[in-house]
Structure formats: C-alpha cells, structure tokens
Amino acid sequence: QLQFVESGGGLVQPGGSLRLSCEAPGFTFEFYDIGWFRQVPGKEHEGVSCISSPDSNRKYAEFVKGRFTIWRDNGKSTAYLQMDNLTPDDTAVYSCAIVDHCGTDYNIEPIDSTSWGQGTQVTVSS
C-alpha cells in the first residue's frame, strides 16, 4: 500500500519558513492529484493544499493562502510545500496523500484508501 515519505519539518520561530518534501518512491506519481494535510493531536487530518496533474492547478486552504506554495516534480515523484510567515497555529504533523480531485469545486480531501505515513513535524515557537 502506498505511503509517502515526508521530510523537511523542524522547529522554527514565528515568521520563519520551512520547505517540506513528499516523495513516492517507485510510484507512478504523475497520474495523481496530490494534497498536503496536517494533523494536531486529537483532531482529524486537515487539508492544507493540493496540486493536480498534469496541469498543476493549485488550491489552498484559506488559512494558508498567500503564505504557502505547493509544487511538484513528477520526474522525481516528489511534491513540495514552501511555508512562509509561519505562526504557532501552523504547528502540526504534515503529511501528503493522493486526492481524488484538486480544484475549486472540491474540498482538499484524501482518497478513502489513504494509508498515512509518519509525516513530518512542524513546530512554530519562540
């Protein structure tokens, strides 16, 4: 079962930046829309951003618009999330997953069969 490998998290001060990566080794990455999600203890995964394939249409949750940027490199089977102007509210474990559709008419939701990887911890604190 597919599990992505996320990396790039860490501890950063408010206003700082991080770049997350999400790899899918050996997976036909280019055929799928990919989403970034985050989870805090006791809550469900929350959609952050997604990017479609092959046209790379992007969608962002309202709470990250203007601060986060998503892109993908199909040749490397990798998706990225650049996070700028981070706030303590962005503290969470960030993971990626396939989404059925990435577009203005759809919520950022993982497919039903998602098997979550370990994710990467992002902590924003002074």
Image (tube, helix red, strand yellow):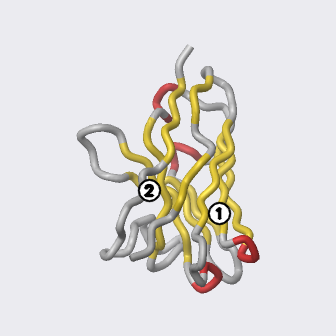
Q: Is residue 5 left or right of residue 109?
A: right
Quarter holding the N terminus is bottom left
Residue 79 marker: 1
Amino acid type, label 1: Ala
In the shown orientation, is residue 4 left or right of residue 30? left
Residue type pointed to by label 2: Gly
Q: Position of residue 116 (x, y in %)?
A: 38, 61
Q: Relative to residue 77, is residue 36 depicted above or below?
A: above
Residue at the extreme front:
26
Q: SS for tag 1? A: strand
> Up-down: is 15 above or below 38?
above
Crowding at label 2, few (<14), some or many (≥20) Cα neighbours within 10 Å?
Answer: many
Residue under label 2:
47
Residue 28 x, y percent position in the rendering: 60, 84
The residue at the point 46 percent across, 73 percent down is: 99
How would you rate the neighbour count of disc 1 (Cα within 10 Å): few for under 14, some for 14-19, many for 20 or more? many
Provide the secondary structure element on which disc 2 rests.
strand
Residue drawn at (37%, 74%) of the image: 111
| Quarter residue 77 falls in | bottom right
Q: Earlier in the sequence, mark 1 or mark 2?
A: 2
- Quarter holding the C terminus is top right
Q: Residue 25 is drawn in which quadrant? A: bottom right
Q: Nearer the viewer, mark 1 or mark 2?
A: 1
Is any part of residue 120 visible from this angle? yes
